[in-house]
Amino acid sequence: MATIFSKIIKGEIPSFKIGENDQFCAFLDVMPVAKGHTLIVPKKEIDYFFDMDSTLLAASMSFSKEVATAIRRAIPCKRIGIAIIGLEVPHAHIHLVPLNTVGDINFDKPKMRMTEKELEEIASKIRAFMN
């Protein structure tokens, strides 16, 4: 059964896409813990992150670095944090979160509610710094 992420990748569900290559897609989390919170998702459906083969796993970090660099240039922050949780959607994914404090990556805090316009503005700013 296709996951929500597979449907986003195929364009069946709208998203605020940051970028993609032949193996991965990056898009904004619509329920972010911080402004600019982005998900990196392999196009191949894999439930558990560490079930990816070593080549794909390494490629996920390379693509994440490219996206994190763009986020950091677009969103004022000290660092880009990374989290791999994988409990909420059965499709491997990486969270890239702009950080100013360690609390910015707390997934237990209430999620931000942003309008489509706000999300598109953020996505556009980040896309402007993608290679």
Image (cartoon, grey):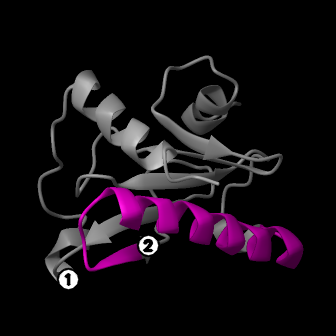
Q: Check residue 83 in the rendering and tell me which mark sits there, or answer none.
A: 2
Determine whether the residue tagged by mark 1 lies in a helix, strand or loop.
Answer: helix
**Which of pointers 1 and 2 lies earlier in the amino acid sequence?**
2
Rendered residue at 62%/50% (across/down) = 91
- Rendered location of residue 24, percent (x, y): 71, 50
Q: Classify 125 as above or below 76.
A: above
- Rendered location of residue 110, percent (x, y): 12, 53
Rendered residue at 62%/35% (across/down) = 3
Residue 86 visible in the shown view: no
Residue designated by label 1: 102
Q: How many marks?
A: 2
Viewer-proximal residue among 47 and 65: 65
Reply yes or no: does residue 74 show up in magenta.
yes
- Rendered location of residue 40, percent (x, y): 57, 55
Reply yes or no: does residue 115 show up in magenta.
no
- Rendered location of residue 23, percent (x, y): 80, 51
